[in-house]
Image (spheres, rainbow, N blue to C red):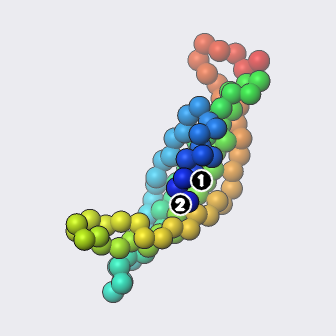
Amino acid sequence: HQIGRVIDRIGLYSHTFHFLGQSHHVRRAAGVSGEVSCIAHHRWRDEVDLDHVMYIRYADTYRLGRDGRWRIATRAVGVDWSETRVVDVPGRSAR
């Protein structure tokens, strides 16, 4: 499964934070499709504390499950851009 690969990849980081922002959804006969924006932070320490920030769009389709709850049926992930930042940790100098 793809989720297993994601867990392996983010396991490299000491912290992650994913902020889900604006979204747009359209109801269709077969279900719902939508796009969700995300800013994903991935922290680790090299010689300094670093944060790899990714600006992501999830293109999803949703299906209603047997339990009456909506589930993600398919997901395509698009990365619009990314950057790596030095993190200012209070009480710790960058160098």
Q: Is residue 22 left or right of residue 81?
A: left
Mark-to-mark CA distance, 1 and 2: 7 Å
Q: Where is residue 54? Give x, y as percent.
A: 63, 50
Find residue 14 and name its label: none
The type of residue carrying mark 1 is Arg
Find residue 5 and name its label: 1
Q: Front-most of 55 and 60?
A: 60
Q: Front-most of 11 and 56?
A: 11
Q: Residue at x 54, y 53 (%)?
A: 4
Mark 1 residue element: helix
Above or below for 53 versus 21: above
Label 2 environment density (alpha carbons within 10 Å; few <14, some 14–19, many ≥20) = few
Please state, as top left, top right, bottom left or bottom right, where the C terminus lies in the image.
Answer: top right
Q: Is residue 65 left or right of residue 18?
A: left
Disc 1 and disc 2 in contact, CB within 8 angstroms: yes
Find residue 1 and name its label: 2
Based on the displayed image, in which of its 4 quarters is residue 77 positioned?
Answer: bottom right
Q: Residue at x 56, y 68 (%)?
A: 76
Q: Front-most of 70 and 19?
A: 70
Q: Residue at x 55, y 47 (%)?
A: 7
Based on the displayed image, in which of its 4 quarters is residue 41 positioned?
Answer: top right
Label 1 environment density (alpha carbons within 10 Å; few <14, some 14–19, many ≥20) = few
Q: Residue at x 48, y 62 (%)?
A: 36
- Residue 38 in view: yes
The type of residue carrying mark 2 is His
Q: Where is residue 15? Give x, y as percent.
A: 56, 34
